[in-house]
Image: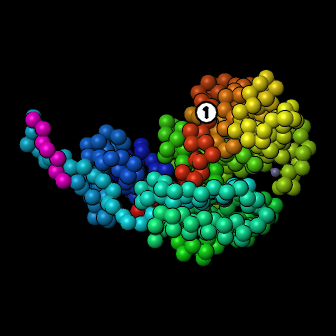
Amino acid sequence: MGEIAVATLYSGHMPATTQRSSPRTRTRDDLYDLIRTSDGLTRAELVDATGLSRSTVNSAVVRLLDAGRVVESDLEEKGPGSGSGRPATRLRVAPKSSHVAGVDFGHSHIYVALADASGEPVGEQRIELDVDLDAAGAMDVAADLLARLQREHDVERVSQLVAGIPGPLDTLTGLVRSPTILSSWVGLSPADELTRRTGVPVVVENDAVLGAYGELRRGAGRHYEHFLYVKASHGIGASIVIGRAPFRGSTGLAGEIGHTRLPGHTEMCRCGNRGCLEAVLSVETVREQIRHAHPGAAEEDLRVGRVDDPVTRRILDEAGRTLGGVLADLCNLLNPEAVVVGGELGLYGAPLLEGIRAAVDRHAQPATAAALEVVAAELGTSAELVGALQTAATAAAR
Ligand SMILES: [Zn+2]
C-alpha cells in the first residue's frame, strides 16, 4: 500500500523542526512517539493503535531500529495456541544517558524543567519575573535555573533545550518580530542567546504552540484531531491544531488572537491599536475586577480562583463571553472539535468556560457550535512547559 496515502490518515503532529518533513518521516516520528510514551509495544499493537498497514508499520520500525532510536526486547514467552509464527517482540525507546530541558517564558514568569530522554520531568524551577522588560536578564535567569537543576540532579549533559516565548517569533529567521510586544526582545534570536548561555542546542517556539503540543500529547488535546488551544494569561494567544499538528502560518505568526479588534472598544493596546481583545481582557483585568468587588480578599485566592460567589461568577462569565465572541468567529472558520482553554485564566474553570460556551452558542453557526466542546486545559499553566519537554525529547531522539 502506498505509504503517502496511508500516512495522511494518521498525520504528523510534530514541532517546527519537522513541520516540512515528508509523510514517511512523519509516520516514523509518530510511531516513535507512540513507542516512547508506552511501556513497550508490539508491531501488532502499533498497527491497531494507528490504523496503518502492517507493511507501513514494519518498514518504519525497521528504519527506527536501524537508526538506533528503538530497541527490540527479548523474545516473550509464547503462550499456548499462539501458533508457529514469529514470536512477538516489544519495541522500546533505546536508552540514552542524556537529558532534555524546557523553558517557558511568560510575560511575568520563567519556568524551567529538566527531563529524562523520554520527556518525563525530573525537576522544575519556577520564578516570577517581568520577562518583557529585560530579555537578556530573563535569559540569564533561565540559564542559571537550568544549571541549578543540573547540579541538583547530577546531570552533566543536556542534549536539547526547547523554550517558549509569549510573543511573535518568526520561524523563518528565529527572530522576535513585534516592535511593541516583548520590546526588549525585538531583533534578538532567543535560540542563539540561550545556546550561548547554556551550551545546549536550543529550539524556540511561540508559547501557545508549545501549550497546544503539551495538551495534544499529555492533556485534553489527546482526544481531538482538530482543536483550538487558547493561552489566556497576561496576553492572549492561540494555536490552531489541524490534524493533530499545530498550524503556524507562513512565518510562524498564526494564532495571535489577542489583537483581534472588539467592536465598540477603544482601550489602548500595547501593539499600538485600540480595542484589541487582550487590551480588554487579561488575567490582570479579571483579577482587578474581582479585587475591586472583594477588597479584603487574599492575593493568592484571587490568583487561583478560590473566590467563588455570584459577583465573581458574573465577572468570569463576562470575561468568558468576551473571549468566546472572538472564538466563535474562529470556530465558524475552522469548525474545530474543541476549544481547550489554558493559561492563568483557564484556572478559573467552569464560570469562565460557561461564558465562552454561551458566546459560541450565540455567535457561531448553530451546527458549528453544536459540534464544539469547550474544556479547560488538563495541564493547567504547565501545558507550555510540558509541550517544551515533549518537543525536546522528540528532537533529541532524532
Ligand atoms: Zn493589540
Q: Is residue 240 above or below residue 32?
A: above
Q: Which residue is mark 1?
A: 375
x, y percentage for residue 11?
Answer: 45, 47
Snapshot colouring? rainbow
Q: Which residues are magenta?
A: 74-80
Identity of the residue drawn at 62% across and 31% down: 374
Q: Secondary structure at mark 1?
A: strand
Instruction: Check disc 1 and give the amino acid type.
Output: Val
* 163 within the magenta span: no
Dot 1: within a 10 Å radius of its alpha carbon, few (fewer than 14), some, or many (20 or more) residues? many
163 or 122: nearer the eye?
A: 122
x, y percentage for residue 277?
Answer: 80, 43
Quarter of the rendering occupied by the C terminus? bottom left
Q: Is residue 208 left or right of residue 225?
A: right
189 or 302: nearer the eye?
A: 302
x, y percentage for residue 125?
Answer: 60, 57
Identity of the residue drawn at 30% across and 48% down: 40
Identity of the residue drawn at 76% across and 59% down: 130
Identity of the residue drawn at 54% across and 51% down: 386
Asked whether residue 80 is in view, the answer is yes
288 or 191: nearer the eye?
A: 288
Q: Is residue 356 left or right of residue 201?
A: right
Total marks placed: 1
Q: Is residue 8 above or below residue 153?
A: above
